[in-house]
Image (spheres, rainbow, N blue to C red):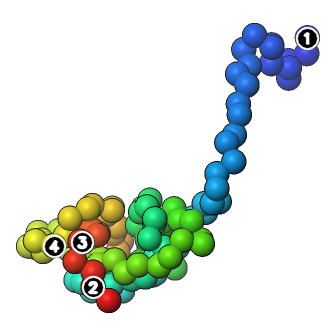
Amino acid sequence: MDSKTIPEELTIPVRWEQSAQQETIWKFPVSLVGHQTIEVPCDAVPLCVQVQHEVVCIWYRVSPDAPAQFRSIYIHETGHDLSPNARKYIGTFQIRGGRLVFHVFEGMDASK
């Protein structure tokens, strides 16, 4: 056996189930404001928030064909009061070399 071959007893067979609807990851740029509403597929699951090319973005796992819905996004700076509507934590990002730190939440009050 050469060094690149994995012994058969160490391999685990993997079976991928074909889902009815293929999922992917989409990026949604957001503004650096306290509250805003964005439109995403209804089954969107937030994965992370980061700054890309000086723009705050939230990445969601989505089914592209799912119907759209509006979600409220809350962005709060460290040390500031949280909105009572800020429910589900998505992530934290920093700007200006780490001098400003913000925390992103989804809210349950989107109504459009």
Outermost residue on the bottom side: it is 112
User: Mark 4 sits on what residue?
Assistant: 85
Can you tell which quarter of the image residue 82 is in?
bottom left
CA distance for labels 2 and 3: 11 Å
Secondary structure found at label 4 = loop
Q: Is residue 94 above or below residue 109?
A: above
User: Mark 3 sits on what residue?
Assistant: 107
CA distance for labels 1 and 4: 61 Å
User: Mark 2 sits on what residue?
Assistant: 111
Q: Nearer the viewer, mark 2 or mark 3?
A: 2
Q: Are marks 4 and 3 in contact (CB under 8 Å)?
A: yes
* In front of the other: 94 or 1: 1
Q: Position of residue 90 (x, y in %)?
A: 33, 62
Task: Say which amino acid is labelled 2.
Answer: Ser
Secondary structure found at label 1 = loop
Q: Position of residue 4 (x, y in %)?
A: 85, 23
Task: Say which amino acid is labelled 1.
Answer: Met
